[in-house]
Amino acid sequence: MQEPDQEARLMAVAALGDPVRRTLYELLRRSPEAMSRDQLAGSAGIPRSTAAVQLERLVASGLLSTENRKRGGRSGPGSGRPAKLYRTVRPEVAVSVPERSYDLAARLMAAAIEKSSADGSPVRDVLAQVAFEAGNELGSAAGTIDGMLTQTGYSPEPDGQGGYLLGNCPFHRLAHRHRDVVCGLNAALLTGALSGCADEIHQVLPDPDGPYCCARITCSPTAGVPAAPRPQS
C-alpha cells in the first residue's frame, strides 16, 4: 500500500503538469521573497481569479505554503488588511519521489517536468513522448503485450475477441485526482508497449467508462482475430 507521504509527493508531481501551475510555481521558486496573488498574476500574465484557483491547487498538493502579512512593514490602524502570500516548500518534491509504489508514473512525470523546464516544450507533449519510450522498453523486455500488461500490474483478461480487458489501473489513486494527465500517460505507455513488442495485431482504445482502467487493448480491425493467450502468471 502507498504510504501517505509517498502519495502526497506523487500528487505534487502531477500538479505541475498543468502549464499555469508550473509557471506560478517557477515564479515562486526563483523569488527570494513570498509573493501575493496580484504579484503572481501580473508576472504570469493571467487573471487574478485564475491565479487564485491554481495557487490553492499548489497549496493543496503540498508544493506551496501561505502566510498572511501586511506588506511594507506597516502595522496598526489604517495599515490595511494583511495580504495572503505564497512561497515554495522545500525540498522540491518533483525530484524526490521515492521509487516504491507508483514509481513508474513518478519517474515519467519527473522526467517530463525536467525536460519541459529545460527546453520549454509543453509538459503534456513531453510526458506522452517519455511514456511512449518507457512503454517501448517495457514491451521489448516482456516480448508480448500480455506479458507487459501483467508485469506492469494491469491484470489483463482476454475479452473473447482477441483483445484484453484491463482489470486494474496501476495508477489508480493518481488518476482519481488527475484523470486527464494520467490517462494520457497511460495511453502513450500502452501504445509504446505495443511498438516495443512488435505487436501489429492489437491497438489501444480509450475506455472512459471502464470499471478499472481508462483504456483497453483491442484487436485491430485490419488484423485477423487471434485467440488471445492467457495472461502470464
Image (tube, helix red, strand yellow):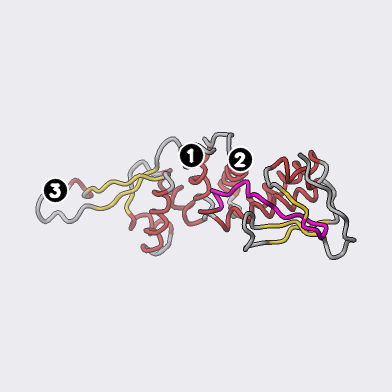
Residue furthest to the left = 77
In primary-sequence order, the first of circles 2 and 3 is 3
Q: Residue 173, image x and y in percent?
A: 54, 48
- Extent of the magenta region: 159-175
Say which residue label 1 marks.
Answer: 93
Type of amino acid at the residue the image marks with label 2: Arg
Q: Residue 96, image x and y in percent?
A: 52, 35
In primary-sequence order, the first of circles 1 and 3 is 3
Q: Secondary structure at mark 1?
A: helix
Report the Cα–Cα distance between label 2 and label 3: 47 Å
Type of amino acid at the residue the image marks with label 1: Val
Asked if the residues shown at circle 2 and circle 1 are in contact, with their CB atoms under 8 angstroms apart, the answer is no
Q: Nearer the viewer, residue 31 or 157?
A: 157
Indicate whether 225 appears above or below 70: below
Asked if the residues shown at circle 1 and circle 3 are in contact, with their CB atoms under 8 angstroms apart, the answer is no
Report the Cα–Cα distance between label 1 and label 3: 35 Å
